[in-house]
Image (tube, rainbow, N blue to C red):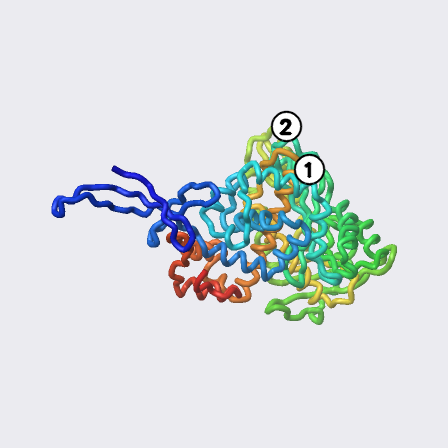
């Protein structure tokens, strides 16, 4: 016979199961009590017991611990709370998990359940597919909070590096989708994504979305207005050659903006500068050693409305030899491919298909029904003359070494774009509405900020010689926490894990 009784212990009710049985030795009825658990005084329900040594759950701890601390040190936590209030923890959780496991956000909740991140950052809500969708839409509609976050990122004086990439999509719900420059390679409409990076800190600062048909040149005007609106009072713009136009240069000069920009060789000014520099560059007195390489430089200036611009025609001898070798090798390959082919009426289309941008270097003739290829002397001379050369324009008083060094640093933006598209799994876009797309881009941007902050720490600690970011996170994923009874306990931290966490500027964990 079994029944349940309630026993008060220190004023709290506890439930026990009583089993009656016959004791054959003592020849009498006896009772055996089994503890069932604590009684909920509000509902009367029994809260089942959990054995003190019973393991009920295990979660991954290492990556979550590292990123939660790095987010705090980078100021992300405070900035998100100031801009988004109660949404901050959810945004940070989504961003951090995209760094740890860059999967579709509809799968975020199962990933969070495997991680100790929610406990570390105090996230109380679940982020199921439905709630994640609602969060993205709310971020996409909240342009003020997004701009407040951007404003907290920028400094009044900074060196800004700006570039544009594009994202393609088959979605019919995105109003910014238009056919642009990538159509030939993707066959899809695109959205242009312009990002600004601080050259001083190397950190992404803010971004802007443009319709896919908008060219790089047109975006510069909006960029300057955005930078001023976000509080930037003085900056140096490091721009790619795609931003060159007479109107852009004159506008920046009239606005008093400093810039460094390469000049495309196809422009009339470039041809003038190259022609003007040919003879001076032959003078051995213009040669010098920079970064262990031989460079020859011709400096001049050009007049624009609004002021003068300093121009540097820079020739790197090693780069010139490498580019000439590559050019001759490519020319020879094209000649071998075309020479002796059967002639047909659309042979010039075939030439453009085979030679691509080098097609203007060749003349083809029909000789007895076969193709004969000849190099165009003047075109080849011009192509060879450009090898190893670059033309930099600047409104600053930098010398050519300073301008070249500063311009080279803009390649960090290209690396940031690669990170956004590849490790953070952003291409192609898979979203259902413009608002959810905008929200997704913001979460991805916060992920990029966090990953870049970690990357900077790894560079400073010289960790990248041995392993990459993903390898570090995999090593830390071995560190787990285990729930024993009602208590979370940290598993043993290896020396390798302690050293890695410490090298990234975070105090290694010893207990929860």
**Residue nearer the viewer, 61 or 7:** 7
Residue shown at 64% from the left, 42% from the top: 439
> Which picture quadrant has residue 36?
top left
Residue 279: x percent and y percent? 74, 63
Q: Residue at x 74, y 54 (%)?
A: 263
- Residue 260 picture location, percent across and down: 74, 59
Tag 1, which secondary structure? loop
Any mark on residue 180, and which?
1
Examine the rendered structure and indicate whether residue 210 appears above or below residue 408.
above
Q: Nearer the viewer, mark 2 or mark 1?
A: 1
Q: Which image quarter: residue 73?
A: bottom right
Q: Could you tell me which secondary element the residue under label 2 belongs to?
A: loop
Q: In this rendering, would 424 be left or right of 295?
A: left
Compared to residue 454, the image places residue 366 above or below, namely above
Q: Is residue 434 above or below residue 474?
A: above
Q: Nearer the viewer, residue 53 or 262?
A: 53
Q: Residue furthest front?
A: 28
């Amino acid at each position: 016979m079994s029944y349940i009784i309630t026993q008060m212990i220190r004023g709290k009710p506890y439930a026990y199961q009583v089993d009656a049985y016959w004791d054959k030795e003592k020849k009498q009825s006896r009772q055996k009590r089994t503890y069932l658990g604590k009684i909920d005084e509000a509902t009367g329900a029994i809260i089942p017991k959990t054995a003190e040594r019973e393991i009920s759950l295990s979660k991954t701890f290492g990556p979550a611990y590292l990123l939660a601390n790095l987010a705090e040190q980078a100021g992300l936590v405070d900035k998100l709370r100031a801009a988004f209030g109660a949404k901050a923890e959810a945004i940070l959780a989504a961003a951090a998990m995209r760094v740890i496991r860059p999967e579709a956000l509809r799968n975020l909740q199962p990933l969070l359940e495997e991680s100790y991140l929610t406990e570390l950052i105090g996230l109380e809500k679940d982020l199921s597919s439905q709630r994640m969708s609602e969060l993205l839409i709310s971020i996409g509609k909240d342009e003020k909070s997004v701009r407040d976050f951007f404003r907290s990122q920028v400094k009044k004086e900074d060196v800004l590096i700006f570039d544009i990439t594009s994202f393609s999509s088959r979605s019919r719900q995105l109003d910014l989708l238009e056919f642009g420059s990538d159509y030939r390679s993707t066959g899809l409409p695109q959205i242009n994504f312009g990002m600004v990076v601080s050259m001083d800190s190397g950190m992404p600062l803010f971004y802007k979305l443009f319709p896919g048909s908008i060219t790089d040149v047109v975006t510069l005007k909006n960029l300057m207005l955005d930078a001023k609106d976000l509080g930037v009072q003085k900056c140096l713009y490091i721009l790619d050659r795609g931003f060159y136009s007479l109107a852009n240069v004159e506008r920046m000069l009239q606005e008093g903006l400093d810039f460094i920009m390469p000049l495309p060789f196809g422009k009339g000014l470039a041809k003038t500068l190259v022609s003007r520099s040919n003879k001076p560059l032959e003078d051995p007195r213009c040669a010098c050693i920079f970064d262990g390489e031989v460079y020859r430089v011709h400096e001049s200036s050009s007049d624009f409305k609004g002021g003068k611009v300093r121009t540097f025609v820079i020739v790197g001898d090693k780069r010139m030899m490498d580019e000439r070798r590559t050019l001759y090798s490519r020319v020879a390959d094209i000649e071998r491919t075309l020479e002796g082919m059967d002639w047909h009426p659309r042979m010039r289309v075939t030439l453009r298909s085979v030679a691509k941008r080098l097609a203007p270097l060749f003349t083809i003739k029909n000789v007895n029904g076969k193709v004969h290829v000849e190099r165009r002397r003047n075109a080849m001379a011009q192509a060879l003359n450009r090898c190893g050369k670059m033309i930099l324009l600047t409104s600053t008083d930098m010398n050519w070494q300073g301008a070249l060094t500063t311009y080279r640093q803009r390649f960090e933006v290209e690396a940031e774009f690669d990170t956004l598209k590849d490790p953070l799994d952003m291409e192609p876009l898979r979203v259902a509405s413009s608002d959810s797309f905008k929200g997704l881009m913001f979460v991805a941007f916060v992920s990029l900020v966090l990953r870049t902050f970690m990357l900077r720490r790894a560079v400073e600690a010289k960790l990248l010689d041995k392993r990459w970011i993903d390898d570090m996170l995999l090593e830390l994923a071995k560190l787990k926490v285990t729930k024993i009874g009602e208590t979370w306990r940290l598993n043993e931290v290896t020396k390798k894990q302690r050293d890695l966490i410490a090298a990234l500027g975070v105090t290694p964990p010893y207990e929860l």
